[in-house]
Amino acid sequence: MKHTITLIPGDGIGPEIIAATVRVIEATGVDIEWQTHILGAQAQEKYGTTLPESTIDSIKQNKVALKGPQMTPIGKGFTSVNVGLRKALDLYANVRPIKALPNVPCRYPSLDLVVIRENTEGLYVGLEHTVVPGVVESIKVITEKASTRIAKYAFEYAVANGRKKVTAVHKANIMKLSDGLFLECFYKIAKDFPEIEADDKIIDNCCMQLVMRPEQFDVLVLENLYGDIVSDLCAGLIGGLGLAPGANIGEQGAVFEAVHGSAPDIAGQGIANPTAILMSALLMLRHLGEHAAADRAEKAMLVVFADGKTLTKDLGGTAKTDDFANAIIDKLKAGEAAIA
């Protein structure tokens, strides 16, 4: 089956790691036609908007996109392109698997959990205004609709992926109405999935427990801002953002992306680690039903990690971005028996 996928190279190291990832995905033999589009600063310069309609329309038509990291100015300039894209396509579920990799030093080498973050509301969407000079108000909006559908997604994900427990993370002891509603919706949905254990943790306690005993968690479901923070914390438990994939899922389509930034300080040097975007692309293949191809590519990648001979600089190696991709492709070409 042929798949048409929107490809957004992104900023900084984006084009380099996207190019390496595309080569690995194509080496699996999956038939893909890539449609390249731009967002962010590049689009602003060319089209006068950071979210051009042509890019949005392409994702809506193809239903799937692979996206490199986008630069977001801090404290000034245009608003987050990532947030804008999620709002434009109603990509309500952010999914970030956190799994330790071979030969990557970390405190929890057997860690395997998933962070599912509500993507469309809460404080993170940036509803802010100045009340009077020197006083700024940020508005947190939590709705029954959004809270219910993210809880339902989390439980359905658990069932589909053989997970045993879903934990809601909140601050309902203080924000009794907003976080209280989120928690109420979670437990209503939990009743429909009696085979999945359901519990909850207050956000500050959850962070402490993640550092001390992360193995107690399986699937975490969180509001937008909490999910953003906790997913980065979890990435740190396995070696950093360069190893953490991400997916943004909605009814109008799905956008797969690495969770790290554009790293302009190393852009153009060919030394960036493409692992996170490659793993995101593997999530994409599974989303498309190409499970066998995703499994082969993942096995090849894990063998490269286990060998430890072709790791990028951030992992203590000397390999370039393309060297790492070539090593995985070589394992793929060696055949399934060689990488089983």
Image (cartoon, grey):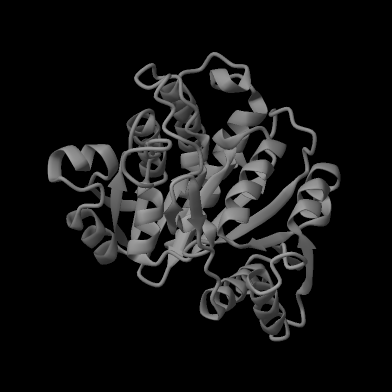
Q: In this image, 280 relative to 60: left or right? A: right
Quarter of image, res 175? bottom right
> Which of 283 and 45 lies nearest the eye of the viewer?
45
Q: Residue at x 35, y 56 (%)?
A: 85
The quadrant of the image that shows the N terminus is bottom left
Q: Residue lying farthest front?
A: 132
- Could you say where residue 254 lies in the image, as x and y percent from the top left? 40, 61
Q: Residue lying farthest top?
A: 318
> Which of 140 and 226 lies nearest the eye of the viewer?
140
Q: Residue at x 50, y 32 (%)?
A: 328
> Which of 220 and 319 lies nearest the eye of the viewer?
220
Q: In this image, 266 relative to 143: left or right? A: left
Quarter of image, res 63? bottom left
Q: Residue at x 70, y 61 (%)?
A: 219
Judge whether 276 appears above or below 193 on screen: above
Question: Can the viewer see residue 178?
Answer: yes
- Could you say where residue 15 lies in the image, as x and y percent from the top left? 32, 32
Judge whether 49 appears above or below 327 on screen: below
Number of callouts in the render? 0
Q: In this image, 220 relative to 4: left or right? A: right
Q: In this image, 340 relative to 202: left or right? A: left
The quadrant of the image that shows the C terminus is top right
- Could you say where residue 278 lies in the image, as x and y percent from the top left? 47, 41
- Could you say where residue 258 lies in the image, as x and y percent from the top left? 48, 43
> Which of 182 and 64 lies nearest the eye of the viewer?
182
Question: Can the viewer see residue 289?
Answer: no
